[in-house]
C-alpha cells in the first residue's frame, strides 16, 4: 500500500497511542513512550509487523504511546495506514 498523505489515529489519553503516518522514502519509525526503556523494542516490532502485513514499504511513522496494549497500538497503526492511503 502506498501512503499518499499525512494521516493520524488515536489520542493522547492514558492507555492509548497516537499514531501519525506520512509519505517518505524508506521506513522511519519514531517512538515516544513512557515505557520505552522496558517495551520500546516490542512496540517498534509491532509497528514494523503491521507495516509489513499492510504492504507499506515507504512511510514515516510517529508513535506517541501512553501505555497502550499491543492490540491498541496495532489498531491505531492499521487505521492510520488506511487513512493515509486513501
Image (cartoon, helix red, strand yellow):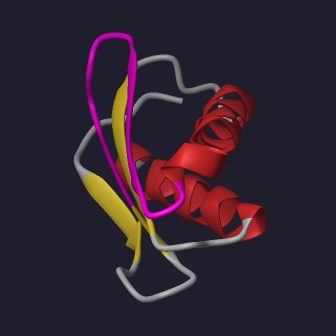
* 23 left or right, relative to 49: left
Residue 45: image location, x then y, percent = 68, 33
Residues in magenta? 19-35
Looking at the image, residue 25 lies above or below residue 10: above
Quarter of image, res 80: bottom left
Residue 10: image location, x then y, percent = 44, 75
Q: In percent of the image, x 23 and y 49: which residue is there?
A: 6
Question: Is residue 26 within the magenta segment?
Answer: yes
- Residue found at the very far front of the displayed protein: 37
Quarter of image, res 79: bottom right
- Residue found at the very far top of the displayed protein: 26
Looking at the image, residue 60 lies above or below residue 37: above
Residue 23: image location, x then y, percent = 27, 30
* 55 left or right, relative to 14: right
Question: Is residue 2 within the magenta segment?
Answer: no
Of residues 63 and 85, the one nearer the viewer is: 63
Residue 76: image location, x then y, percent = 55, 64
- Residue found at the very far bottom of the displayed protein: 13
The number of discs equals 0
Of residues 83 and 28, the one nearer the viewer is: 28
Of residues 80 and 45, the one nearer the viewer is: 45
Q: What secondary structure do most residues of the magenta stretch adopt?
A: strand
Q: In percent of the image, x 44 and y 28: which residue is there?
A: 2
Quarter of image, res 1: top right
Looking at the image, residue 32 lies above or below residue 4: below
Q: In percent of the image, x 75 and y 33: which residue is there?
A: 53
Looking at the image, residue 23 lies above or below residue 47: above
Q: In percent of the image, x 34 and y 62: which residue is there?
A: 8
Amino acid at each position: 500500500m502506498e501512503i499518499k498523505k499525512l494521516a493520524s489515529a488515536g489520542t493522547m489519553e492514558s492507555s492509548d497511542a497516537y499514531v501519525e503516518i506520512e509519505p517518505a522514502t524508506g521506513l522511519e519509525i519514531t517512538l515516544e513512550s513512557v515505557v520505552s526503556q522496558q517495551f520500546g523494542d516490542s512496540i517498534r516490532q509491532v509497528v514494523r509487523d503491521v507495516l509489513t502485513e499492510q504492504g507499506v514499504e515507504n512511510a514515516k511513522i510517529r508513535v506517541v504511546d501512553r501505555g497502550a496494549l499491543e492490540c491498541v497500538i496495532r489498531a491505531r497503526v492499521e487505521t492510520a495506514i488506511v487513512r493515509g492511503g486513501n
